[in-house]
Amino acid sequence: MTNTASGFRHASVALAAGAALILTGCAGGGVSPLGSSIGAAFPGGMGASSPSERAESLRFASLVLESASRSGLVVLGALAGDTTLWPTGQQGALVLYRDGLAATVGFRRDLLSLRYTPLENHAPLENHAESSASGWVPWRSDTPVSYRVASHWQNASGDVLAAEGDAELRCEPAQTRALPLSSRPLELCRELITWDSGGVSQSRFYRSPQDRRLWAAEVSPWPEGDQIAWEVARAWW
């Protein structure tokens, strides 16, 4: 793990993307007015009801988020292409790309970027016209699949750190999994990252066997990092 100037560039890109989403928004189905999203996201806005009860009462796309920094129901604030922005209140946000973790704002330690690069013997299986190498994500591929992971994050002191490692993703046959508002058959995909600096991280992705959309995930985005987990309550697709 090292401080890196490129990390600051990643931070700027992530913040600029978030600002663009907030300013431009999108009128697509399931996107909440940003103020409603912030007001409904975390404890204090809707009494003592559970996140699932809150999701049931809202018509907007929503996730149940669990992390060391932020936990509760978050509502889709904006979307742009494959990127979705989920305000958490208190000037925080979760950013997903192709349903997977991309960045955070306002957490104890913030993820600035998380990039996946398939190894040469595992070229992207999606249509190249629809998916460039820079936008490739492992959970949309047949598994097992091997790839490189590059992570940039910022600690509580403001230092920007980076790490890279080799990863493999393996998926199991679908089993029914309970979600906040439903149950559905999902494949459990286990990711193992061996970081160049030493240490191992494990994450889990739960994907639909039909379209490989993620319905839940438990992600450790950097070495010895806090786990960030979420489940889809109301889908936005």
Image (cartoon, grey):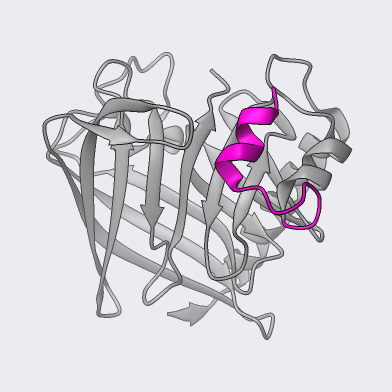
Q: Which residues are magenta?
A: 43-59
Against 133, is 94 above or below? below
Residue 198 at x, y percent in the picture: 25, 80
Q: Is residue 45 magenta?
A: yes
Q: Is residue 84 visible?
A: no
- Residue found at x 11% / y 31%: 173
From the viewer's side, name the closer residue of 144 and 228. Answer: 228
Q: Is residue 52 magenta?
A: yes
From the viewer's side, name the closer residue of 136 and 199. Answer: 199
From the viewer's side, name the closer residue of 214 and 134. Answer: 214
Count of numbered tags: 0
- Residue found at x 47% / y 35%: 99
Position of 187 with respect to 173 (left or right) is right
Q: Is residue 202 visible?
A: yes
Residue 205 at x, y percent in the picture: 31, 43
- Residue found at x 12% / y 37%: 172
| Quadrant of the drawing holding the N terminus | bottom left
Against 231, is 197 above or below? below
Position of 99 with respect to 217 (left or right) is right
Residue 120 at x, y percent in the picture: 19, 40
| Residue that sits furthest to the front in the current view | 48
From the viewer's side, name the closer residue of 73 and 23. Answer: 73
Against 205, is 173 above or below? above
Residue 207 at x, y percent in the picture: 31, 31
